[in-house]
């Protein structure tokens, strides 16, 4: 995937500003690269659409290339898509019951052993492994070996072919023997079928697990989504375990499963050894998919510098009473970037009132921008020259009413006032809040 993205991004490398043409080309390439990496077509399409919207018109900072900026945008979208934060597992029940489900060969038994190891080593638990794959004697042997290896107890009933009974007996055993976590390894088939779904459904209903984890092989690509959906339909599981990410890594499955099934990926499995288990961090996965961790931090640093420089310039202007409509536009863009700034500022004593009448929503922005674009450079720089005649001309040019122009002039005055205030003690307070 990385190579393909690299190639896609080369399109805009070295170009000064991201324009519709180079974005459209690049976005198409990125979409193709994602689809090739097993990202569901619709997911890839939505993602690239958002990337395009964000990228268009962005000024490219002098110290980075458009390609790098684009990479940063793609990276952020990937993170967003995969869930932003790490989601742990819920261990609050006593005992906590964890049901492991998935197709045969997906890595359930291996993961069960790894999870027991993780809970014992890192979370100081006393887990019980339960062998509920009753069809293959080898499966029980496999879990026995793993249990020995990580030094945890295994519960098995060689003669019993009823997984519901075994799991219920195992929970009883756990309660009697002070095991605080019960990990139930189940049987899977090679493909979704009625019998398997009924069996896992029955176990699920009988034991009412604290956590049901769906294990999926990252190498199965697009099929992973169908399987994930089918299991989710029956089990409404809490999270996904993505295995075999050590092989020919395809980030696609992680992206797609998360955005199609809307369940968090909780663990990733990266090898056959019992230690090869990691919590899932969306940020890291995005880095890995892009393979460009350095670029991302570079862009972030450049962006911060850029913002700082802009802020300094603005402060000077405000101090000299030179705040004009161009700066107003810049501010609008900043506000858009920051999201719900009004709420944040409203929390400050004194500021709340001042901005109460300032309309901050996207539609309002569109009108405002249209009006400002109809002003001459001089009018933007020195709003005081805008008299009635000019207002009428501006309104006509923007296709708005005279009242709209008046309203904007009023908003502008309020904004200028607010900007001044930001340089006082309250402004400092706000900056502190925002940096948190
Ligand atoms: P189950 O049928 O779902 O219980 O799957 P298993 O746990 O038996 O795993 C099937 C095969 O995949 C075994 O050979 C495992 O050693 C291997 N396996 C499981 N997880 C991983 C992984 O993260 N990386 C690699 N390379 N192999 C894995
Ligand atoms: Mg197994």
Image (cartoon, rainbow, N blue to C red):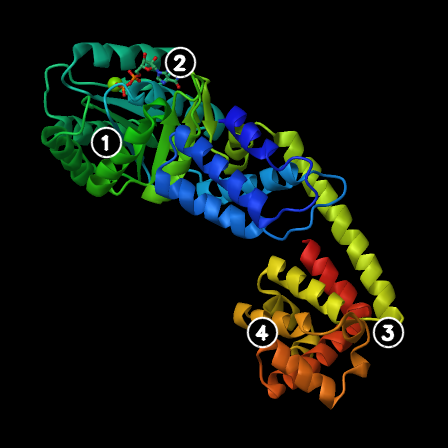
Circles 1 and 3: CB atoms closer than 8 Å: no
Q: State whether label 2 is within 8 Å of ligand 1.
A: yes
Circles 2 and 4: CB atoms closer than 8 Å: no
Q: Which badge, 1 or 2, comes first in the chain's sequence? A: 1
- CA–CA distance between discs 1 and 4? 64 Å
Q: Residue 278 location, x and y as percent?
A: 47, 26
Give the residue number, with chain letter if any, for mark 2: 272
Q: Residue 370 location, x and y as percent?
A: 61, 71
> Closer to the camera: disc 1 or disc 3?
3
Of residue 79 and residue 2, the one placed in the foreground of this image is 2
Of residue 43 and residue 146, the one placed in the foreground of this image is 43
Q: Secondary structure at mark 3?
A: loop
Asked if 200 appears above or below 43 in the picture, the reply is: above
- CA–CA distance between discs 4 and 3? 25 Å
- CA–CA distance between discs 2 and 4? 59 Å
Q: Residue 163 location, x and y as percent?
A: 14, 26
- In percent of the image, x 65 and y 35: which residue is there? 13
Q: Which badge, 4 or 3, comes first in the chain's sequence? A: 3
Give the residue number, with chain letter if any, for mark 3: 321
Of residue 37 and residue 66, the one placed in the foreground of this image is 66
Q: Which badge, 1 or 4, comes first in the chain's sequence? A: 1
Give the residue number, with chain letter if any, for mark 4: 367
- In percent of the image, x 74 and y 80: which residue is there? 413
Q: Which badge, 1 or 3, comes first in the chain's sequence? A: 1
Give the residue number, with chain letter if any, for mark 1: 171
Q: Is residue 302 left or right of residue 6?
A: right
- CA–CA distance between discs 1 and 3? 74 Å
């Amino acid at each position: 995937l990385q190579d393909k993205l690299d190639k896609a991004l080369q399109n805009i490398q070295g170009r000064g500003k991201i324009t519709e043409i180079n974005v459209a080309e690049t976005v198409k390439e990125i979409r193709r690269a994602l689809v090739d990496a097993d990202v569901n077509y619709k997911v890839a399409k939505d993602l690239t659409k958002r990337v395009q919207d964000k990228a268009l018109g962005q000024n490219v900072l002098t110290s980075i290339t458009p390609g790098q900026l684009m990479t940063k945008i793609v990276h952020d979208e990937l993170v967003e898509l995969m869930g932003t934060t790490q989601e742990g597992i819920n261990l609050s029940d006593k005992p906590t019951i964890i049901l492991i489900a998935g197709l045969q060969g997906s890595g359930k038994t291996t993961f069960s052993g790894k999870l027991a190891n993780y809970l014992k080593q890192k979370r100081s638990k006393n887990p019980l492994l339960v062998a509920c794959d009753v069809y293959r004697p080898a499966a029980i042997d496999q879990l026995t070996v793993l249990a020995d290896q990580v030094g945890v107890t295994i519960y098995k009933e060689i003669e019993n072919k009823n997984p519901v009974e075994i799991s219920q007996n195992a929970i009883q055993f756990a309660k009697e023997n002070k095991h605080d976590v019960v990990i139930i390894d189940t049987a899977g088939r090679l493909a979704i079928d009625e019998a398997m779904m009924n069996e896992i459904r029955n176990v699920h209903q009988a034991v009412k697990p604290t956590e049901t984890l769906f294990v999926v092989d990252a190498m199965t690509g697009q099929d992973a989504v169908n399987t994930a959906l089918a299991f989710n339909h029956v089990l409404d599981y809490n999270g996904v375990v993505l295995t075999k990410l050590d092989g020919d890594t395809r980030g696609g499955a992680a992206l797609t499963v998360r955005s199609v099934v809307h369940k968090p990926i909780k663990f990733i499995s990266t090898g056959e050894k019992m230690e090869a288990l990691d919590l899932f961090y969306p940020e890291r996965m995005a880095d890995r998919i892009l393979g460009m961790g350095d670029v991302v931090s570079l862009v972030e640093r450049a962006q911060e510098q850029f913002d700082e420089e802009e802020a300094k310039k603005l402060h000077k202007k405000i101090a000299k009473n030179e705040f004009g409509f161009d700066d107003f536009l810049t501010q609008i863009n900043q506000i858009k970037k920051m999201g719900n700034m009004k709420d944040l500022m409203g929390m400050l004593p004194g500021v709340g009132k001042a901005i109460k009448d300032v309309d901050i929503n996207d539609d309002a922005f569109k009108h405002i921008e249209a009006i400002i674009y109809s002003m001459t450079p001089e009018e933007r720089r020195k709003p005081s020259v805008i008299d009635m005649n000019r207002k009428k001309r501006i309104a006509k040019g923007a296709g708005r009413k005279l009242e709209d122009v008046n309203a904007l002039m009023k908003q502008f005055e309020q904004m200028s006032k607010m900007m001044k205030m930001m340089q006082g003690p309250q402004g400092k307070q706000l900056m502190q809040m925002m940096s948190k």
